[in-house]
Amino acid sequence: MSYVLTLVASDTKTPVTQKHFKEIGIIFDAYNLSFTGKMDWLDKDKAANIGISDKAQFSLISHLRDFLADDKIDFFITHNEHRTKKLLLADMDSTIVTGETLDEMAGHIGLKDQIAEITAKAMNGELDFHDAIRERVGLLKELPYSDVLDTLEHTGMSEGAQTFVQTMRTQGATCVLVSGGFTVFTNAIAEKCGFHFNHGNTLEVENDKLTGKVKEPILDKFAKVEFLKSYMKDLNLEAADCLTIGDGANDIPMLKIADLGIGYKPKEAVKKEIGNCIIYGDLTAALYAQGYNRKMFQIGV
């Protein structure tokens, strides 16, 4: 089985260069790896890839992260076969959208910092996800539903999100938004980005106010895996055909199952487990990771 190394620049001031590949070749020697072809540009100065002789140990991943950190260049090591994926499963909060929607709702009643602290611990795997979501939603009891809708209106998209999803969709991939957040957000964000399907948790509402409860069953990391497996079965796909992307600890299981699992602006728990991460760039880096060139992007959709 063959592999590919892809470099993606995040800043025009520090472009990808042939020198980066030359120096990585020297690093590879220490790990008994080598290049198996010539560097190929996917986007001049922005993204390029090259064949490599084998997969990477995590010690090499860490070495490359340190080497490329100063220039804020992201990298991916992927299988060459089935490189362009047919199924995308994406997390929503802090991945497709810029923030944590539950934290932003809490801002309406002055509890953003308190709830954000719980969220951060849950996303780094320090708290049980079920307990954390029940505790946070409980603190929002009596929040007017109009404040929820106001939060939705002010929810920002992550850079490159629409281009990422629309490009994969145009190329025939099934795109699914799956979130431990709430359907009031996933429905709207999925439509705005171009996802075919979306799944999330449901807030309980009575008399136009939150009751402080989440309707069961709660969608967690295990549910994300089940959705992935279900779509794979329905579409007759294998793990080799799948891309998953997310930022938090509850995304790790689905990131590990897909052939290409990408941590986006990953929490430390994710960085320790997942080799392919977008640390510096935007979501279009996930397209370069699949071998897309810039001409294929659905820009400004």
Image (tube, rainbow, N blue to C red):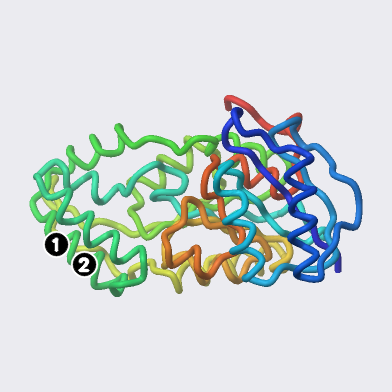
Residue 163 higher or lower than 27, as above or below: above
Q: Counting other residues with Cα less than 10 Å from the Cα at mark 1, is it few (<14), some (14-19), or many (20 or more)?
A: some
Going 62% across and 62% down the picture, which residue do you hit?
63
Label placed on residue 62? none
In the picture, the quarter occupied by the C terminus is top right
Q: Do tag 2 and tag 1 residues touch (Cβ < 8 Å)?
A: yes
Q: Label 1 is placed on what type of residue?
A: Gly
- Secondary element at tag 1: helix
Measuring 24% from the left and 63% from the top, which residue is drawn there? Answer: 214
Image mark count: 2
Residue drawn at x 58%, y 41% is 71
Please identify the quarter of the rendering in which residue 98 is found. Answer: top left
* Residue underneath mark 2: 134
Q: Which amino acid does label 2 sit on?
A: Arg
Q: Where is residue 225 in the image (x, y as percent from the top left)?
A: 52, 70
What is the quadrant of the N terminus in the image? bottom right
Label of residue 138 in the image: 1
Distance from the alpha carbon under mark 2 to that under mark 1:
6 Å
Residue 113, x across and y down, in percent: 17, 51
- Compared with 113, 78 (above or below) is below
In this rendering, is residue 256 above or below 264? Answer: below
Q: Quadrant of residue 64?
A: bottom right
| Foreground of the two, 102 or 125 | 125
